[in-house]
């Protein structure tokens, strides 16, 4: 991968590709080292159908703060963690059972 002067904005659920155009996955979270990508298909769309699995255990897609562990509803992704004030880049997707 080569560095360029071009700034690219990434967001949760956005597809990412390598330099050859191969899809790597979908952005799942961020931290001080960069971003996390998931290859699971259901995570990318973030539609209402993906908020729960509908199976035993009723897992829910939530957001979680990397700094303090605070969790919340994915439909209301905060600009900063309401508990500790960590930046949005410290918030990532979390599946809660």
Image: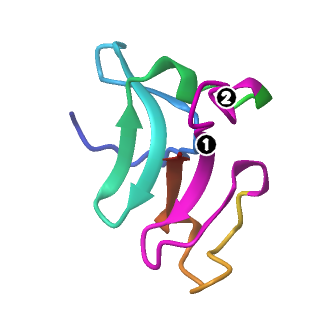
Which residue is found at the position 43% from the left and 23% from the top? Answer: 40
Q: How many marks?
A: 2
Question: Secondary structure beneath disc 1?
Answer: strand
Q: Is residue 46 left or right of residue 30?
A: right
Q: Residue at x 43, y 68 (%)?
A: 66
Q: Is residue 51 left or right of residue 35?
A: right
Q: Specify few, some or many for label 2: CA neighbours under 10 Å numbering under 14, 14-19, or 20 or more.
A: some
Q: Residue furthest bottom?
A: 84
Residue 39 as seen in the image, left or right of residue 96: left
Q: Is residue 35 above or below residue 77?
A: above
The residue closer to the viewer here, 76 or 12, is 76
Determine whether, in the image, residue 79 is placed left or right of residue 26: right
Residue 74 in percent (x, y) is at 70, 50
Q: Nearer the viewer, residue 12 or 60?
A: 60
Disc 2 + disc 1, Cβ < 8 Å = yes
Residue 53 point in image, percent of width and height: 62, 27
Q: Residues within 10 Å of mark 1 (few under 14, many from 20)?
A: many
Q: Quadrant of the N terminus?
A: top left
Residue 71 among magenta residues: yes
Q: Give the magenta part as a residue range.
A: 49-76
Question: For the residue labelled by badge 2, is the local secondary structure a helix, a strand or a loop?
Answer: helix
Q: Residue at x 62, y 75 (%)?
A: 81
Separation of disc 2 and disc 1 at Cα?
7 Å
Question: Is 40 part of what is drawn in magenta?
Answer: no
Tell me the residue that label 2 is attached to.
50
What residue did someone put label 1 on? Answer: 61
Quarter holding residue 21: top left
**Which sits in the foreground, 9 or 84?**
84
How far from the left and from the top, in percent, is residue 75? 78, 48
Question: Is 57 placed above or below 66 here?
Answer: above
Which of disc 1 and disc 2 is earlier in sequence?
A: 2
- Which label is found at residue 70? none
């Amino acid at each position: 991968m080569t560095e360029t002067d071009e700034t690219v904005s990434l967001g949760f659920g956005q597809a990412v590709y390598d330099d050859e155009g191969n899809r790597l996955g979908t952005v799942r979270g961020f931290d001080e080292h960069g971003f996390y990508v998931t290859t699971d298909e259901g995570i990318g769309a973030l539609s209402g159908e993906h908020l729960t699995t509908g199976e035993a255990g009723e897992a829910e897609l939530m957001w979680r703060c990397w700094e303090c562990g605070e969790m919340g509803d994915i439909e209301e992704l905060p600009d900063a963690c309401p508990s500790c004030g960590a930046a949005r880049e410290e918030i990532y997707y979390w599946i809660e059972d």
